[in-house]
Every structure is written in C-alpha cells, then in structure tokens.
Image (cartoon, rainbow, N blue to C red):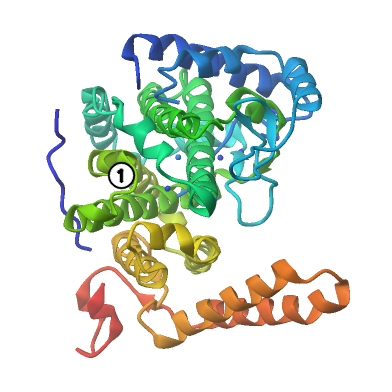
Amino acid sequence: HRLPQRHYTAHTQRSVVRTPHPSKLSTMAATMRAASAVSARATAQPAKLGAARVHKAASFGNAVVARRAQRPVRFAGVARAAAGGVDADTGIKKMREGVKEAADENLLTPRFYTTDFDEMEQLFSSEINPNLDQAELVSILQEFREDFNQKHFVRNDSFKTAADGITGESRRIFIEFLERSCTAEFSGFLLYKELGRRLKKTAPVVAEIFTLMSRDEARHAGFLNKAMSDFGLALDLGFLTKNRQYTFFKPKFIIYATYLSEKIGYWRYISIYRHLQENPDDQLYPIFQYFENWCQDENRHGDFFTACLKARPEFVNTWEAKLWVRFFSLSVYVTMYLNDHSREEFYGSIGLNTTQFNMHVIHQTNKTTAAIFPQVIDTYNPKFQEHLDKLVVINAALAKATSPLEKAPLIAGFASNLLTLAAMAPIDSGSIDLAEDVNSPAFMY
C-alpha cells in the first residue's frame, strides 16, 4: 500500500519527570507489549527518569528482540561481563556473541529523553489550553490509524547477501550507521509510548497519536536492528532501555527537539532515496529502498508536532521563543554535520558527497521549519558553512588530543565558532509580506 507523496514548500518521577526494517507481522503486537512492559518497569525505577528519544522495533516483529526486551537486566549485565570479546571482522566490542556493545555516550550520540509528564498533561488539556484544534488532531489521528506502512517493512534474502558482501572498514562504518539510526528510532519509541500511556485519561486523542507514533518508531528500530543482525552484531534493546542515561527536557523543549528531529529525518531519508534511485549502482544495501515510504512516517510525526506548536503561540511568537528555536535548530544542524563528517567513508560508499548532502538537508529542513518558526538561521550565508567546516576540523583534532593542554585551545576555538554561528543575523520567516526588500533572504522562505 503506497502512501501518496506529499509535497512541501516551504523526551522519573511523575512530578519531576525525558535531540536516520517486520519479518513476521504476527509477532509485532506481542513484541511491542513486551517492550512496553520494559518501559513501564524502567519508569518505576528511582534511578531512571521515565521514558525516552530526536530528529527514531518492527522487526520488533522479530522474536529475538522480543526475548531480549523481556530479559531481566541482571542477566544482561552478567552476559556482558561473562562474554564480551571483539568481533574478528571489524574490531567492534561485543556484549556477547551476536550482540554489539552499545557505543559510548557523548554529546553527539543519540539520546534518550524524559520530561515532566504532569506539565505535558496540562499542555494537551482542552480546559487549560483552548488553542488546541481538536478537529485537526482528530484528522491527524485518522491518518495515523490508516497505518499506510503496515506491510512495508518486509525483508527478503537480499539483505543478508548484501551484508556478506560489505567487508573491511566499510563494514564497521556501516554497522555504526545502523546502530546510531536504531538507537535514535528506539529512543523515539520509548518516549512516545510513555506519553501515550500517561495522557490516556486526560487527552485520549493525543495519547492515541503518541501510541501510534511509537508503533512507527518500533518498526523502524526493529528493522534497523534486524539489519544489524545481518552483520552479526545486533543491539540488546532491553538492556539499553534500563541502562542508558535519560536526559530531562521540559515539554516545550521536547516539542522543539522532536519536531526538528522528525523533519530533518524526513529530508535525510528522502534525499538518500532519491540519490540512489538516480544512481542504482551505489545501492550498497537494500534498506535504502525502503526510505521513500519510511520518510513519510517521519513527515507525519513532524506535522503532529507542528500542530502542537500552533496550539501554544508562546512557543513560537515571543522573543524568548525566537532564541530557543534558533538554539535547537543550530544544535540539530551542527550535530548532524559533525557526525556525518566523522563518517565520510559511509556516505562515499553510497556515492554521496558528505558536505553537499548535509547542506542540502539543512537548507530543506530550514525551509520546512520556516512554516512555523518565527525566525530561521540564514543557512545560505557563506559564513554559515564556513564555520561548520571549521568545527569539523576542530572536532577531528579534539578526537586525537590526549592532554588537557592540547584540548584547551581546541575547546576555546570550538566555542568561539559556535558562538559566531549563534550570533549570525537570523531571517524572519512566515509570510513573504514581511520582507520589504525583494533581495531579502526572507524571500527564500
């Protein structure tokens, strides 16, 4: 069932409580219930802050992931200590045979998020928030219920065959790409699933939307994790649920971050898909053939968060809001740019120029956000890419630096370039009538 193409112009405690596919559809419901139970138990632990995600298991239709999700943490920890080892082909550390040790967390790795769920309930209360457009929310819910991609994420034998053909350094880099993508999608599943559970009584329509978005994220994460198993190194998602750190964001910031995450995810997926359609010889692995319909899930999620932003004018119309939207936009763009440039070999392996790909995605995402954000970053200003490139050089040098003496000037330079980017004059977005000068950059938005 193909989803019609749509064209765009333009994440604990209750009171102090969270920033790129099914082999057997019949097992997906049972698996999601197992993962949901893990999420609920994690919420009850004082050391953890709720559920998780930024700008994304269906092969949660895969019984292996289900069993891992249900396995108690103490067993995962024992297995990690007892087995371990290193994958002979890639040098990647293993928790146990067939299971990859999760990458170390840093500022650039996908995060799990938690939030103040009490405040989130108020955000979606019609009594407290009269700006909620219930008709629009019901319309969005109906689209999610259609479940256009229910039968889309079905694998075939070409996956394992293609994985066996990827060797050496390319194999290691490809596994890292799959891991980052899987972690980001699974983070979204955890956050959305918990929000769906918490909001069920106070905002049933919104709660169901979050639950159905968690369904989508589960499919994505599971499909990616099953792909990792083609390379002999999957993730233990149950272990991640209970052992990864959760970052607290206020509801307002959760909405900014997830909106940007979904929209930039759309542009990443559709850009890779279109490139490989035009250059089939670069189709290294069949997962990319699923990106056209996949990215529409990201787009629908982003549209829901657009409705959330419209319902709270203070999130987009105040001077403070202008600062926050630029801060989160810049954070998302810089993070993607640095991450991708530290893995240029991957993008080269599918025929993409990393810089060109990143700038295209940034420009398109920026244009999309201009439909709701009061100001956007001037990404077409040559100084914007110039400072991004300087950050790439400094980030590479920081990765090699060993002593505080070496790192100090690099950190200072990194901060200086970031501040310069943040201080660049923004562009007022929205109606073209706002621009009095026909040469104004606002006409691009």
Residue at point 24% right, 37% down? 136
Residue at point 53% right, 33% down? 191
User: Could you say which quadrant of the image residue 348 lies in?
Assistant: bottom left
- Left or right: 87 in relation to 349: right
In the depicted view, which residue is nearer to us: 10 or 16? 10
Q: Which residue is mark 1?
A: 288
Residue 19 position, x and y percent, is: 54, 50
Q: Is residue 416 above or below residue 331?
A: below
Q: Quadrant of the N terminus?
A: top left
Residue 164 position, x and y percent, is: 42, 37
Residue at point 28% right, 79% down? 442
User: Could you say which quadrant of the image residue 212 lies in?
Assistant: top left
Element carrying mark 1: helix
Residue 38 position, x and y percent, is: 61, 17
Residue 296 seen in the figure? no
CA neighbours of label 1 inside 10 A, class few (<14), some (14 to 19), many (20+): some
How many discs appear? 1
Q: Is residue 218 above or below residue 381?
A: above
- Left or right: 56 in relation to 434: right
